[in-house]
Image (cartoon, grey):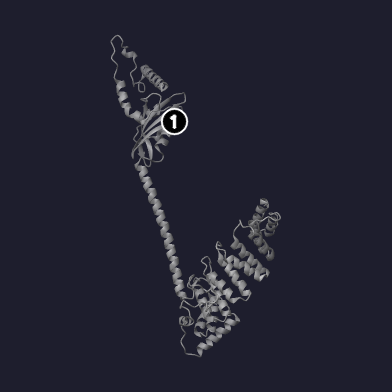
Amino acid sequence: MNQRAYEAGKAAYRRGDIQGAVEALSQAKQDGEVSGAVDHLLGNCLMKLGRFADAAAAYGHALEDASYGNSGALACNRGRALLAAGHLQEAIESLTLATKDSTYATPYKANVALGNAQLKAGNLREAGVAFRNAAIDETNPDPSGSLRSLGSCFMQMGRPIDAVEAYRTALDFTSPLSDQNQIYADLGLAYVASNRMAEAVDAFNHATADGQLVLSSEAQTAYDAARRATMTTSSSPSDTNAMLAAAGYGTGSFDPLDPLGESGEFMPSPEDTGFFSISEREIVEQDRRDRRAKRKHRGLRRFLTFLLILLIFAGVAGYAYYSGFGWPTQEAVAEGIFQTKGDGGDIADYLAGTVSEDAARQYSSILPSSLSGVKVSGVDRSMNESTVMATATLAAGGEQSYRIQMVRDGIGWKVADIEVMYPSQGGTDATLEDAETEAQVDAEAEVPAETTPTDAAPAEETPLEGEGVEGEGVEGEAAEAEYVEGESSEDTAE
């Protein structure tokens, strides 16, 4: 297939250039090639141009492409094209084929077209069956139109009582805002033919009440005759339901189009809708109840599904919160505070509200200002507090481990305390187990070793451990230098 020509044809069709679309699509296939997509669109274009025979041929070519599918729609379109081209029998065959495609989404379209084709062929009964099938199709947005056509079939067959039932049912399938005038006029003709003059006058009065409909000469003559008949008799209006019951409706065994059941195609079938086995009022009421039940069922199902999803989400969220999870996570907060300090930013956004300004400055001072990466080696979670062990890889080389205490902040976490950690085992990252023994290690480090007076160094020349951060003057600077050097040597040992 010439994809470029096909796309050009589609573009021309969308912008309304039908002739251009035909020219492009005609070049989209090579001789002998089958393409349902190309021929389907080409058939639509030819129909718009009134080239019905050519359109029928295009739809026929599309049907040859078994991989394309859409056989019901294609057969329906081909039948319509053949009907418009005057090939009546071929149209009936193609439309009948369309109605038998179980995958066809809108079979009522094929049934309506088939009913019209059968009417043209003079096959009143077959036309009635087609219109009946169109009327009971749930996808049909206008069942009243099909029922009116069914009533017309009954009238032409000389069965006005059946026509009355069809027209009354058609009225029940229209909304109050729909144009019901023509249906009432048809119903009036059916009543006159049934010799029910009072009902005929009432139907014609409805048809002409708003002045929008001008009755045909046949309907006007029937209207006048019905009015004259009602003026010359004192009988009360006849009971239409009794008339229909007398004709066999409501017994469950009478088929208006095949009363003897010889064809095997009852019209309509009680298994499908119950038409003509119950009154039209019962049909409408049942239809309304079914629609309400379906809407309620769909609404309840959607609500219960939403509620179940909500409960599951709330349960998962509650369990995660209780287990110490949040967003952003402890890992993300730890990595973020190191990255922010390394980029020269302010770490205040990561700190809890209880952290003082002095503590914030101290935490900032012990975080590396230059690093090549940070790794979280452990997290001890609880609902409101967490401990994170992190190891920073310094830009100059070496690593330094930290213990970071965090507190819950909404659904996320904030830093409450930062401590420098030294691993208890050489050559490995600091872990939560190391943190548990750190207090003992620090305590042992604070006990001075026993020395002899001669071995002891002068007090003023020995920097005190821990004074490096807060020392002042020359001694403070020396202590700070000693602290940094010690940190570097410890890192190198790891």
Asked if residue 442 lies left or right of residue 332, the reply is left
Can residue 53 be seen by looking at this rendering?
A: yes
Image height of 396 relative to 137, above or below: above
Q: Residue at x 31, y 13 (%)?
A: 459
Q: Quadrant of residue 410?
A: top left
Q: Position of residue 412 (x, y in %)?
A: 39, 40
Q: Nearer the viewer, residue 287 or 18?
A: 287
Q: Quadrant of residue 299?
A: bottom left
Image height of 328 relative to 128, above or below: above
Q: Position of residue 320 (x, y in %)?
A: 37, 43
Q: Position of residue 10 (x, y in %)?
A: 64, 55
How many numbered markers are drawn? 1
The amino acid marked with disc number 1 is Val
Q: Residue at x 38, y 45 (%)?
A: 317
Element type where label 1 sits in the image: strand
Q: Position of residue 117 (x, y in %)?
A: 62, 72
Mark 1 nearby-residue class (10 Å; few <14, some 14–19, many ≥20) = some
Image height of 22 relative to 348, above or below: below
Extreme-top residue of the structure: 454
Q: Which residue is mark 1?
A: 374
Can residue 204 be seen by looking at this rendering?
A: no
Q: Residue at x 38, y 38 (%)?
A: 413
Asked if residue 289 lies left or right of residue 56, the reply is left
Quadrant for the C terminus in the image: top left
